[in-house]
Amino acid sequence: MVSREARFLATDNIPALLRRLGNTYRVFAPVKVSDTIVLFQEFAESAGLALDEQTTLPPKELLFPQTEGLVSYRYRKDAEDLEKSEVQVEETLEAPPTIIFGVRPCDARGLTVFDAVFTDGQWRDPYYKARREATTIVTVLCTQPESTCFCTSVGGSPTGIEGSDIILTIVTGGYVAEPVTEKGETLLQDEAFTPAGDKAGEAGEAREKVSVERELELDGIAEQLLDIFGTDFWEQVTAKCISCAACTYVCPTCFCFTITDDTTGIEGSRIRTWDSCMFYLYTLEASGHNPRPTKTERYRNRIGHKFSYHPTSYEGMFGCSGCGRCIKVCPASLDIRQVLREAKAHG
Amino acid sequence: MAILDKLKDGVQRELEGLEFVIGWEQGYDPLHASPLFIRTPGDIDRLIWNPLCVHNLASYLPSLKGRRVGILLKGCDSRSVIQLLQEGLIKREEIVIFGIPCRGVVDLSKIKSRIDTSQMRAVSLMDDAVVIEIPQGREEIPLDDVLATKCLSCQYPTPLIYDHLAGEVLPPQRPTEVLYKEVEVIEELDVQDRLAHWERELDRCIRCYACRNACPLCVCQDYCAAESRNPRWLSQRAGVSEKVMWHIMHALHLAGRCTDCGECERACPMDIPIQRIRRKINKEIKELFGYEAGVNPEDTPPLYTFKVEEPTIQEREW
């Protein structure tokens, strides 16, 4: 942390704060869009904030949009020789300064999985990198785990700070705000934040009280998944899977994409869109061969990637932050925790 | 003997000749059931039957063609099997059906819209109520308030096709008039408002295809036109026009085939009321051809056949 100087943010001051920040930034916060759905939406005072429940989708769309223009292009024929044409290409990168308010620690930590792959490793993704740098993450620490939460099993914490720029702890009348990064420190200069005084102590105590039971023991899971790769375990465990992409699209750490060209006449755009390892097309090769022809190979890859290949490539970091959304949305109620337990016990 | 005991007994007797029997087991919390693949007699104890058994297990059948399996079916689920048989997508002799007379299953989204179930401790299911224990206390909800919408107008509580029936034939208990209630509300909007309504609802679609993959009649699956790159029918863009287009494609491919099981809407992680689109088309099919999908294995779906003169379509008098 840059500084531990805590500030107080009264609940009543939040709308004014977000309105002021809206002059300089795009500001997103959780909004209840129907009885059961909470989404990050651009802040509008009329909408009201839904800070006390997990959002239906993580904020990844804001840093890694489901559809993203990479370049636009236009063909131009050579007037002298109609057989010839040239193509003009223009990069279309948009990364306006953005604040995401009301993120949960698991989702903020999910971004560190993206960071490892898209910004910190061998390859740099200029689109994600620009957006990540332009974005400030304001995280509300958790108080009550849901029945699907398992952040502590994958190395996270309900009061974790990884991936956040500011952390907010719920106290009487509002939140205690603490900066995690320089970006966060800058934001705390706003007049909505007042000296924390005694509230800082209250926040510390509140954090002590929160706990999420560590229900999975994942030591050695990376090797175990390789050991059972060729067994019938996978066919048995995936029998109920319907091979849709709900689990991957609600996942704060799933980052797979595909690139297609949308061409109309002589112009078009090359777009990057989310893709899912649960789809047949994901690994379909030009020859017609598909190395993952059924849901069994595809689901095995999903688990293998998150709990074996990813930690092997990225210093032990799981490709999972334990948010539990994949469990909640699965049309067959397939529980990734149960799959991991059974995988560990198999053979 | 209770329904569950009869089911267990039947499965026990048939299991040896089958690769597995598909039923339901308790899921990850007291409110969720999950499909169960019974492979050994030891698995039979895990079987459950109650209003949480929401999944239409017939959706698994097309991908199991060629294998001998058993399946538990509610009345509505049995219509999917009939439709699949009509289309030659499954073989009757490969399937042993354990039919269940059903009084209705819950819509979990209706429960979640009433109470916060994220820290729920226990659920008890009574004949006419669901009781949920949450940290704040005990919530009792009348069952009718949280039944799936399809159940409120159910005309087929007893499966229309089965080898074993776990219980007595149950006559229809529900009124038919309410079937199109929600559709009629949308029909009353003018065209612009109707489009605006659907754009607003479908804008939150994430193109995850849970609706497609959960659908028992969506049998193209891996070769779906919405994803096909060559030919490219639809952009992979997640814009509202692509989302609307996808849902229209899905619904039209189900015209005269959809049995109103509601798996599309149940599977949707964004709780979009997409069953209404299919219901609207079912209504049109009923009005045009006097046809209801999945009630008689001997029927030919109207769009699978051709008549020079359709009695209900006045082509020459336009």
Image: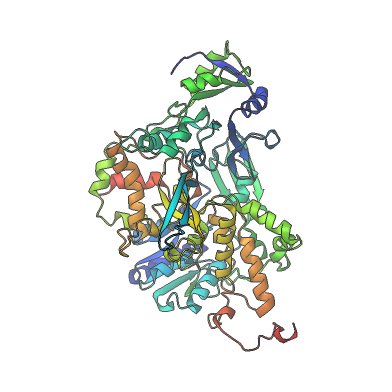
Q: Position of residue A256 (x, y in %)?
A: 40, 47
Q: Position of residue B242 (x, y in %)?
A: 56, 57
The reply, left or right, for residue B284 in relation to residue B38 is right
Position above or below: A113 against B106: above
Foreground residue among B245 and A130: A130
Foreground residue among A133 and B201: A133
Examine the image and state in which quarter residue B64 appears: bottom left
| Residue furthest to the front | A80
Q: Is residue B10 shown to the viewer in this render?
A: no
The reply, left or right, for residue A198 in relation to residue A234 is right
Position above or below: B153 against A211: below
Image quadrant in which the N terminus of chain A is located: top left
| Residue furthest to the top | A197
Q: Position of residue A189 (x, y in %)?
A: 57, 17
Foreground residue among B134 and B118: B118
The residue shown at (49%, 62%) is B226
Q: Position of residue B224 (x, y in %)?
A: 46, 65
The residue shown at (52%, 74%) is B83
| Residue furthest to the bottom | B308
Examine the image and state in which quarter residue B160 appears: bottom right
The residue shown at (33%, 38%) is A123
